[in-house]
Image: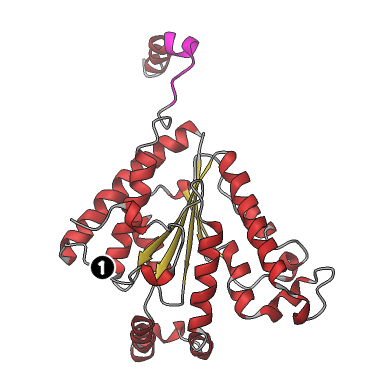
């Protein structure tokens, strides 16, 4: 196994998206990739049980990427061994009327994991500086004071949002949530192939929308927005990892390893000890239960 050190995928300053590949060779057969993924997800599942029992840390997994980058399948494959009580997935779509009555971070704040659990954001609060930046007219739906037309949305507006997101993540991390942010870095050519497969395979036709092609035509603009968003918001407490996504199996192994390596090296996640009084009376409690069958 090579080229899979978490540091290799960490967004570093000065950040340029073109410096990160969309495909790498991790020197594994397809079968080896599956075995390695299974190893990491089983170990993560056991570790999460300990984390749940302790109730000290929460984990937030943020997934971003262009359409067809493999977010849904990555969630399914990486977290399938988790106890259902230990992980919750939130897929953020177009804001609802209720959500639009609140600030743009409200729905994300409400979906944060409780201590002991994982939450996976499939698309995240970053949509508010990505999709809305490519389509600034969407901001008008938020009915923000002073923003009455697209021309009112200045560069200062976006810089303020980056600052708000940094503050949000800093607050969350300071209160016990471990944050991972993954950008699934897909090539335009690989997206073309995946969209074609959706059209050619009847079972996956339902995934296709003509809007996919409209968004694809804005590819370069999205790449620019991703580059700036990652550069503005990657921090030690909330790092961005740029994951080569042209090979889905490799991407899953890399993501699982990054989470595994960081979580399993946190020395203060351990099985809680029983209260001393309860521990001293364990034999007594055992006898009480054993006598029920006499």
Q: Residues within 10 Å of mark 1 (few under 14, many from 20)?
A: some
Q: Residue 99 lies in what quarter of the image?
A: bottom right
**Across the whole image, how many numbered discs are drawn on residues?**
1
Q: Position of residue 270 (x, y in %)?
A: 40, 29
| Residue at (34% x, 61% y) in the render | 77
| Relative height, residue 201 to residue 4 (above, below) | below
Q: In the image, 94: left or right of 6?
A: right
As rendered, which of 85 and 269 lies closer to the eye?
Answer: 269
From the image, tell me which residue sits under label 1.
Answer: 24
Q: Position of residue 10 (x, y in %)?
A: 39, 56
Q: Is residue 232 magenta?
A: no
**Residue 292 shows up from this direction:** yes
| Residue at (43% x, 8% y) in the render | 280
Q: In the image, 209: left or right of 100?
A: left
Q: Which residues are magenta?
A: 272-281
Q: Is residue 274 magenta?
A: yes
Figure quadrant of the N terminus? bottom left
| Residue at (18% x, 66% y) in the render | 30
Q: Position of residue 168 (x, y in %)?
A: 64, 51
| Relative height, residue 102 to residue 197 (above, below) | above
* Disc 1, SS: loop
Q: Position of residue 67 (x, y in %)?
A: 46, 77
Q: Residue 290 lies in what quarter of the image?
A: top left
| Residue at (56% x, 63% y) in the render | 124
């Amino acid at each position: 196994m090579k080229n899979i050190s978490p540091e290799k995928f960490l967004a570093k300053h000065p950040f340029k998206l073109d410096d990160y590949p969309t495909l790498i060779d991790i020197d594994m057969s397809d079968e080896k990739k599956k075995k390695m993924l299974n190893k990491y997800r089983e170990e993560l599942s056991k570790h999460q049980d300990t984390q749940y029992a302790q109730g000290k840390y929460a984990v937030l997994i943020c997934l971003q990427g262009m359409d067809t980058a493999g977010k849904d399948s990555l969630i399914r494959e990486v977290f399938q061994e988790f106890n259902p009580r230990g992980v919750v997935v939130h897929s953020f779509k177009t804001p609802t009327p209720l959500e639009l009555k609140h600030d743009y971070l409200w729905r994300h704040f409400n979906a944060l994991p409780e201590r002991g659990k994982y939450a996976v954001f499939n698309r995240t609060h970053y949509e508010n500086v990505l999709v809305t930046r490519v389509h600034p007219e969407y901001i008008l739906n938020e009915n923000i004071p002073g923003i009455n037309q697209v021309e009112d949305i200045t560069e200062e507006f976006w810089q303020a949002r980056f600052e708000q997101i940094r503050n949000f993540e800093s607050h969350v991390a300071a209160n016990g949530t471990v944050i991972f942010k993954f950008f699934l870095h897909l090539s335009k050519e690989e997206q073309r192939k995946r969209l074609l497969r959706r059209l050619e395979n009847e079972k996956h036709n339902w995934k296709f929308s003509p809007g996919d092609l409209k968004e694809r035509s804005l590819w370069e603009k999205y790449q620019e927005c991703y580059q700036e968003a990652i550069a503005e918001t990657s921090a030690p407490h909330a790092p961005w990892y740029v994951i080569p996504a042209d090979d889905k199996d490799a991407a899953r192994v890399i993501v699982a390893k990054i989470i595994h390596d960081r979580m399993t090296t946190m020395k203060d996640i351990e099985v809680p000890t029983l209260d001393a009084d309860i521990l001293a009376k364990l034999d007594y409690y055992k006898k009480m239960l054993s006598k029920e069958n006499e």
